[in-house]
Image (cartoon, helix red, strand yellow):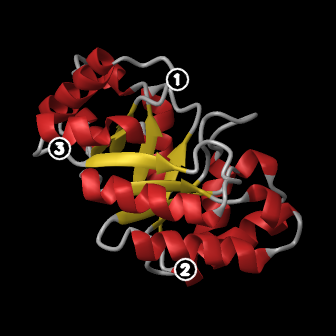
Amino acid sequence: MTNAEILSHIDHTLLKQDAKWEDIAKLCEEALRFHTASVCIPSAWVEKAHAAYPALTLCTVIGFPLGYVPTAVKVYEAALAKEQGAAEIDMVINVSALKSGDDNAVLDDIRQVRKAAEGCILKVIIETCLLTEAEKIRCCEMVTAAGADFIKTSTGFSTAGAALEDIALFRQHIGANVKIKAAGGIRTREQMEAFLVAGCGRLGTSAARILFDAP
């Protein structure tokens, strides 16, 4: 797998709380130069980034990183992000509701964001490090039922990130139209290639620069 092939599957990511516009702009310029799948940036920067880089595919995060804001807030965030130029939305599920056994609330949460972000690619972050295997399987079923485009492993802001065994589990339980995004702790070329070979359609990482100047 070439570096260019790997980069074409990467959401070039910068979600640090203290990121400045200069950092966001650098990320966007790198994404255009090296043809990453998208840039994933905080929602507060979407409008400015879209104006500055209209040809760039912008991804942003909704209900991030904890996921337990009311659904109405996520719906507003998603609709506003779409209006301001985001083409891809990564939303965090309500893990608290899932842990409480309220699958209907989790499913409705995803469905409402899916509707608000109509026309955008929707990726659903389930935060695998906090879930049991049974809960992960339930998430696969709900993400499929809600019509989301991707199930995503992690925010990168919790206790652990992506694991290859979770990708294998997802592949067994997601619907035919759902893809997989791995994120969190993916920092080496070997990890990137391993997750793609395992079946991921996207990778979320802030370490894509290691591929830029390599052969």
Instruction: Say which element carries label 1.
Output: loop
Q: Which mark is residue 17?
A: 1
Which image quadrant for residue 32?
top left
Taking the image as drawn, is residue 162 in sight? yes
Contact (Cβ within 8 Å) of mark 3 with mark 2:
no
**Which mark sits nearer the N-terminus, 3 or 1?**
1
Q: Quadrant of the N terminus?
A: top left
Give the percent coordinates (x, y) of residue 81: 35, 53
Q: Quadrant of the C terminus?
A: top left
Distance between mark 3 and mark 2 Cα atoms = 27 Å
Which image quadrant for residue 43?
top left
Tag 2 residue: 146
Give the percent coordinates (x, y) of residue 51: 14, 39
Left or right of 52? Residue 137 is right
**Which mark sits nearer the N-terminus, 1 or 2?**
1
Give the percent coordinates (x, y) of residue 3: 27, 33
Q: Is residue 43 above or below residue 28?
A: below
Q: Is residue 192 above or below residue 150?
A: above
Q: Amino acid at mark 2?
A: Ala
Q: Amino acid at mark 3?
A: Leu
Left or right of 193? Residue 155 is right
Query: Which is more toward the observer, 191 or 15?
Result: 15
**Which mark sits nearer the N-terminus, 3 or 2?**
3
Taking the image as drawn, is residue 88 in sight? no
Look at discs 3 and 1 and give the one toward the viewer. 1
Q: Amino acid at mark 1?
A: Gln
Instruction: Say which element carries label 2.
Output: helix
Tag 3 residue: 56
Within 10 angstroms of label 1, few (less than 14), some, or many (20 or more) residues? Answer: few
